[in-house]
Image (cartoon, helix red, strand yellow):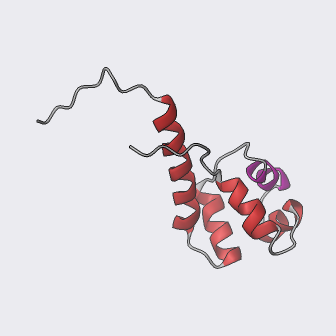
Amino acid sequence: MTVLVNPVHPGEILKEDFLVEYELSAGALAKEIRVPRTRIERLANKQTRVTADTALRLSRAFGTTPEFWINLQTNFDMALAREHVDLSDVKPLVA
């Protein structure tokens, strides 16, 4: 099984590939997509998750899909779970 050593938080993608690229501050983006400034700041600082609402808004603003943002979050969550969840006591129910 491949385990990501340093899973990438979607906020890092937002910050590096979108905010920097578009020369936007978190506050400017928040204003454009009609969310509180702190939502974007916390996401860009990897302190919170991408929600469905935020995914829809980011996809509209940047011409991506909401699934792009949700999948970034899901992949990050799964990478962390693989590193921290002990499944040794869970037995397969199917042979």
Q: Which residues are magenta?
A: 37-44
Picture quarter with the N terminus: top left
Q: Main secondary structure of the magenta part?
A: helix
Judge by depth and name the residue closer to the eye, 23 or 7: 7
Looking at the picture, how far across and down is residue 22, in whole percent?
A: 82, 75
Picture quarter with the C terminus: top left
Q: Residue at x 73, y 51 (%)?
A: 43
Q: Residue at x 85, y 60 (%)?
A: 26
Give the quarter of the image for residue 72: bottom right
Give the quarter of the image for residue 19: bottom right
Task: Tell me: residue 88, above or below residue 8.
Answer: above
Looking at the picture, how far across and down is residue 74, in whole percent?
A: 51, 51
Q: How many marks?
A: 0
Task: Tell me: residue 79, above or below residue 61.
Answer: above
Q: Residue at x 77, y 60 (%)?
A: 15
Judge by depth and name the residue closer to the eye, 72 or 40: 72
